[in-house]
Image (spheres, rainbow, N blue to C red):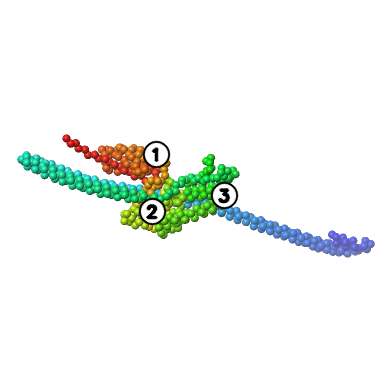
Amino acid sequence: MPTAISLCTAVPPTMSMEPWTLAFLALVTLLVGGGLGVLAVRMGAKSLLAKAKSEAEALGSKAHAEADALMKQAELDGQKAAEAHRARVESEVSSARTDLKKDQERLAKREDALDQKSERIVGRETQLDGRFDQVKIREGVASDREEQVELRAVEITETLARVGDMTVDEARRELMERVEQESQEQAAGLRRRILEDAETGARKDSREITLMAIQRFAAEHVAETTLRSVKITSEDMKGRVIGREGRNIRAIERATGADVLVDDTPGIISVSCFDPIRRAIAGEALQRLVDDGRVHPSRIEEIVSATQQSIEERIKEKGEEVVVECKIRGLHPKIVEAMGKLHFRTSYGQNVLRHSVEVAYLSQIIADQLGLDGALARRCGFLHDIGKAMDHEVEGGHPAIGMDFARRFGEKEEAVLNAIGGHHGDIASTTPYTPIVMAADAVSGARPGARRESMEHYIQRLRQLEALATEHESVHEAYAVQAGREVRVIVDSGKCSDDQAFGIAERIAKRVEEEMTFPGEIKVTVLRETRAEATAR
């Protein structure tokens, strides 16, 4: 050890020492060196322990940091998995709700169909009960006539027995009395028939006079189709409307929802859409763009937005104008707005809003002549086609859509709701105002000039109507009259009874409904001619 060496070397070599002294010094040197060694070892151990502690603390901190990072990553992964699971569950719930809604709609339609079938069955049962009663009455009449015939035969037998004992003058006198009695009975029957014919003729004449008075009411109509044309000043404008690689025309179609048709027709760009509101917005926006001359996507969006706002304001104005014109009170603003939308809707070229105004006044005229409430009839006629304002957006026929819409926005009058839902016969009429509106609707659509139809299609429809009627058994001839609003069918009286004539009329009407497309309604009249012949010799 260094200390022992230094102590040993500190004694001069020349100095002589005792052995025990040397041993003592060696022992001391050994003890001191051992203590110093132990001290050095302990100091080294402390240094290693401190270093180990610092390394352990560093490893612990690192382990804690890694554990925290793993925990955070696990939380993020758990959140992502939970969100994905929640999205899946919500998607499945939404799909299930959609399927449930579709099932409910199908069930509702089936219920409506079943209700209609049950109503038809009840009607047929009522008809059968009526016919059964008629058969019973006829059986009673036949029985009475049989008894009368038997009594008559007995009388004739007695008369012949008595005549054998009569003189010529007595026989002539009795014959004259019998002829007089039969003549009086025939005169009474003839008088009854004349009175009945006169009453029927008076009723028919009054109806014709009323319809002629109604048909004198006329209004202007705006004739539009699903296609609207926009005039342009030059052919160069077509290129601007199309834009580079068609970007402008795509921007117009995307902003308006309408189809823009650019063809070789000079000076015209066409806009096509089944929704009349979108078609009007697209047509006016395109006209403004053409007049302005600046056609690019941002300008297109600006013009379309301004045009849409203008159209919405015009819808409200048109609705308020016709409400004031027809003097209808207490309508919900949504109903007024829906009526304004009908200004842009046409049916066979007839403007639906002006048609509604016309039906309103015609209904009032008919109701006043029948002694009913003219104001209520006018309200029924005014709202009868309100369903056409949203039938592009809602599934179903416009009578049912309009009735639900009017009920939802505060229309509580049962007569008005029944007239809206039943003016095409979809539901049973519960008030007299529904058939009044049906008559006014038919008159408004059938009067000359109200609706537009091509001559070729008109002739084809009349021929098809007559062909359908003549295909039935026992039909002799068929003629379409009143511009195709009525078909008159003549049947062979020898092959068809009165009851069978009603069945033929119903079957022809059903085939016309299934196989033809026509505005309004078509009346089927079956005529069974009975001829009485006598020969004078």
Question: Can I make out residue 374 in this image?
Answer: yes
In the rendered structure, which disc, 1 or 3, sits on the residue that comes first in sequence?
A: 3
Pointers 3 and 2 in contact (CB under 8 A)?
no
Mark 3 crowdedness (10 Å alpha carbons): few <14, some 14-19, many ≥20: few
Q: Which of 69 and 353 is in front in this view?
A: 353
Check disc 2 and give the amino acid type: Ala
Q: Residue at x 40, y 47 (%)?
A: 450
Identify the element where label 1 is drawn. Answer: helix
Left or right? Give the position of 189 relative to 215.
left
Question: Which circle marks residue 360 in the picture?
Answer: 2
Residue at mark 3? 292
- The C terminus is located in which quarter? top left
Residue projecting furthest to the right: 14
Left or right? Give the position of 290 relative to 446.
right
Counting from the top left corner in percent of width and height, residue 106 is at 42, 49
Counting from the top left corner in percent of width and height, residue 256 is at 52, 49
Residue at mark 1? 460
